[in-house]
């Protein structure tokens, strides 16, 4: 007998992406109709993203208000709006496994995208944006030109017309000096006076974004860990493949997972913990890779040894302790908990870490920013990304903190840019500075970075 809902912890099943059934049009359509019918009757996820309002509108606009009356081709609008944030699966849906209904909406959308790709429906621009390692390696040599183009009005108008990248979307900057290169050029040693000295070794998985776009986050993480007594090594065998997952290119994700895990496991065998510097990459290493390559021993071993950077600092604070000297930041911090951090089921580690700083106001926003990778960049979805994130922008503006931080660097930039725009609309000036990662705030509080 089926139950109305479930209080059991969510259980995620492996993705059977190599099976012919995975992209079989008839079987996929039948499963989408089964799931959509259940979602239509429940509606708990109506305010999470645009997928569910689109789905409900499709069904409600039919004379009989049933999923049977919806054309299969119209499901594409629902699929487009999913950002694979996992919040419906992790926080809202009462019918996820082990419930007999076994609803996994994000992975159903992933399956639908894989089927679309098999039919030749691929977005060229999104495909090029997904090549993060290639783009980063090339852009670093012409970074001033690339950064100029990303903020130049006529250039952005051209990009919108030719590539479909919305001219209003904030784009990340590139750096000539990568995080890995900066680390090699400035070796450091752990603080011998810290309680954790000689007890921990951490390999910082640089991630493509930190390595090419925000090396300052990596340097802050390195500085904090060394200060609290942790020996560090920077490792970057390649991208985690999240941009390929977004496009349902599961073969590329599997290739990256096998390659990166093989290299990182060598460090695990040398006694290093693996510390991910962005939420999306942490989610991939801990959870998503295991579902795509469930029989790969390296992937499984890596998942057990991986920490989020904030999670790692909190763990050390609880078990070994931190050195004295954290100084207050009275201007306060507004902490955004991105979906991919929340999906790791580790608790609000960024907020927990920053609350270790004395006499510092900490505000927490646990809601989707709306960005979702290329979803927040492409012209056809950028306005939706802004609409979804508006409650976050308004809340952050009302908090009026100098620092806005997020474990997701794309979300942080998306929030800060739209907070400033919202403030301008209200005729005020936002006190917020540049988007930051929580570990950068810890570095400031320890006096390792300028505030």
Image (spheres, helix red, strand yellow):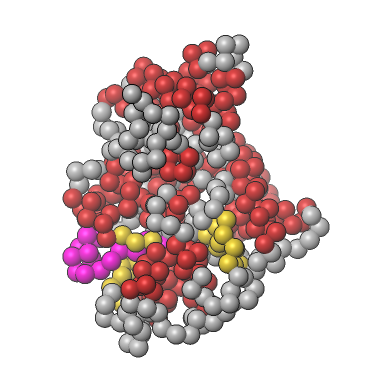
Quarter of the image where one finds residue 30: top left
Q: Position of residue 445 (x, y in %)?
A: 52, 78
Q: Is residue 264 magenta?
A: yes
Instruction: From this view, report whether residue 108 is shown above or below residue 370.
Output: above
Q: Tell me what residue is drawn at x 51 percent, y 28 percent.
A: 42
330 left or right of 322 in image: right
Instruction: From this view, report whether residue 114 is shown above or below residue 131.
Output: above
Q: Position of residue 151 (x, y in %)?
A: 63, 56
Quarter of the image where one finds residue 48: top right
Q: Position of residue 220 (x, y in %)?
A: 46, 73
Q: Tell me what residue is drawn at x 38 percent, y 61 percent.
A: 308
Residue 66 in sight from this viewpoint: yes
Q: Is residue 377 magenta?
A: no
Residue range of the region highlighted in magenta in the rendering: 263-277
Q: Tell me what residue is drawn at x 32 percent, y 87 percent.
A: 192
User: How many numbered badges does the structure rendering display?
Assistant: 0
The quadrant of the rendering that contains the C terminus is bottom right
Q: Nearer the viewer, residue 57 or 9?
A: 9
Instruction: From this view, report whether residue 242 is shown above or below residue 199.
Output: above
Quarter of the image where one finds residue 424: bottom right
Instruction: From this view, report whether residue 77 is shown above or below residue 353.
Output: above
């Amino acid at each position: 007998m089926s139950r109305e809902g479930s209080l059991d912890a969510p259980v995620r099943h492996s993705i059977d992406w190599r099976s012919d059934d995975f992209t079989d049009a008839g079987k996929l359509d039948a499963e989408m109709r089964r799931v959509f019918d259940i979602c239509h009757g429940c509606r708990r996820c109506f305010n999470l993203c645009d997928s569910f309002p689109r789905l409900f509108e499709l069904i409600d606009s039919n004379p009989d208000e049933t999923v049977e009356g919806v054309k299969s081709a119209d499901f594409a609008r629902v699929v487009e709006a999913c950002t694979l944030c996992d919040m419906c699966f992790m926080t809202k849906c009462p019918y996820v496994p082990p419930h007999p209904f076994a609803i996994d909406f994000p992975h159903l959308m992933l399956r639908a995208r894989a089927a679309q790709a098999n039919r030749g429906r691929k977005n060229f621009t999104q495909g090029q944006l997904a090549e993060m390692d290639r783009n980063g390696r090339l852009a670093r040599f012409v970074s001033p030109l690339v950064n100029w183009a990303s903020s130049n009005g006529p250039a952005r108008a051209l990009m919108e017309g030719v590539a479909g990248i919305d001219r209003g979307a904030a784009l990340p900057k590139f750096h000539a000096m990568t995080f890995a290169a900066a680390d090699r050029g400035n070796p450091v040693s752990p603080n011998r006076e810290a309680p954790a000295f000689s007890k921990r070794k951490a390999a910082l998985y640089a991630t493509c974004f930190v390595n090419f776009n925000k090396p300052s986050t990596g340097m802050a993480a390195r500085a904090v860990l060394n200060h609290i007594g942790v020996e560090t090594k920077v490792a970057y065998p390649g991208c985690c493949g999240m941009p390929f997952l977004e496009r349902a290119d599961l073969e590329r994700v599997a290739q990256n997972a096998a390659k990166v895990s093989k290299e990182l496991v060598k460090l695990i065998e040398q006694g290093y913990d693996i510390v991910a510097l962005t939420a999306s990459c942490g989610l991939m290493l801990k959870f998503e890779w295991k579902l795509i390559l469930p029989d790969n021993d390296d992937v499984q071993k890596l998942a057990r040894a991986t920490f989020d950077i904030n999670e790692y600092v909190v763990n050390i604070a609880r078990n070994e302790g931190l050195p004295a000297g954290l100084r207050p930041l009275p201007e306060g911090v507004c902490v955004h908990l991105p979906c991919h951090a929340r999906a790791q089921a580790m608790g609000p580690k960024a907020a927990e870490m920053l609350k270790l700083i004395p006499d510092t106001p900490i505000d927490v926003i646990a809601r989707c920013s709306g960005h979702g990778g290329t979803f927040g960049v492409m012209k056809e979805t950028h306005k939706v990304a802004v609409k979804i994130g508006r409650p976050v922008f308004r809340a952050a503006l009302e908090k009026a903190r100098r620092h806005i931080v997020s474990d997701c660097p794309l979300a942080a930039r998306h929030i800060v840019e739209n907070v400033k725009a919202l403030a301008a609309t209200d005729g005020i000036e936002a006190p917020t500075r540049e988007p930051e990662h929580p570990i950068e705030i810890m570095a400031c509080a320890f006096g390792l970075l300028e505030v």
